[in-house]
Image (cartoon, rainbow, N blue to C red):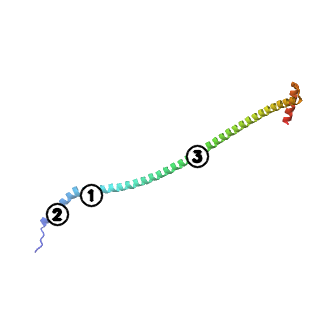
């Protein structure tokens, strides 16, 4: 067996292969490689966007936590202010109630003092009348208005002492 090489046929096949390779390279492989490269770039861009979104989410979460903390601080501050205001109002109302009670007590003391003075006056007049009546009954004579006045004054002096 002899190995023979047909150069014409080899050259024809080589030209034919080169032509098919060129056409495949130009119209099939090159667009496929370009499409693959575009997909690689898109995937890389998507990964970069995912990292960017992840960073944005982390930053947003940190801001949310900060806002929640600030809101909690403000709520506590408002609660403290409300408690202080309530304490001030309670103190003011207590002072008003104490002042009103003291005023009522002062009026009651004044009314009691006036009533006592009136009762003492009534008692003095009654005692004076009884003294005059008793004196006229004991002496058996009718007392003149001057005698009655003098006895009333003496009785009043003795009761005052």
User: What's the CA distance linking mark 2 and mark 3?
Assistant: 98 Å
Left or right: where does residue 133 sit relative to residue 106? right
Q: What element carries label 1?
A: helix
- Which of disc 3 and disc 1 is earlier in sequence? 1
In three-dimensional space, the C-alpha distance between marks 1 and 3, rounded to whole angstroms, equals 73 Å
Residue 152, visible in the rendered structure:
no
Residue 127 in which image quadrant? top right
Residue 145's place in the image compared with 35, above or below, is above
Above or below 71: residue 40: below
Callout in the foreground (2, 3): 3
For the point 20% across and 58% down, which residue is it? Answer: 24
- Asked where in the image residue 138 lies, by quadrant, the reply is top right
Which x, y percent locates residue 62?
A: 46, 53
Which label belongs to residue 33? 1
* Residue at image mark 2: 14
- What residue occupies the far bottom of the structure in this picture? 1
């Amino acid at each position: 067996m002899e190995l023979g090489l047909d150069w014409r046929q080899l050259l024809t096949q080589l030209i034919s292969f080169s032509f098919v390779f060129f056409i495949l390279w130009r119209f099939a492989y090159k667009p496929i490689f370009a499409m693959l490269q575009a997909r690689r770039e898109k995937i890389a861009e998507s990964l970069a966007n995912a990292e960017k979104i992840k960073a944005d989410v982390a930053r947003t979460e940190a801001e949310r936590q900060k806002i929640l903390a600030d809101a909690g601080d403000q709520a506590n501050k408002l609660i403290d202010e409300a408690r202080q205001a309530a304490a001030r109002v309670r103190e003011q109302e207590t002072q008003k109630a104490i002042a009103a009670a003291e005023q009522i007590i002062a009026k009651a003391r004044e009314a009691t003092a006036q009533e006592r003075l009136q009762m003492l006056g009534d008692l003095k007049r009654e005692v004076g009348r009884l003294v005059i009546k008793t004196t006229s009954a004991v002496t058996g004579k009718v007392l003149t208005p001057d005698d009655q006045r003098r006895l009333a004054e003496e009785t009043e002096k003795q009761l005052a002492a």
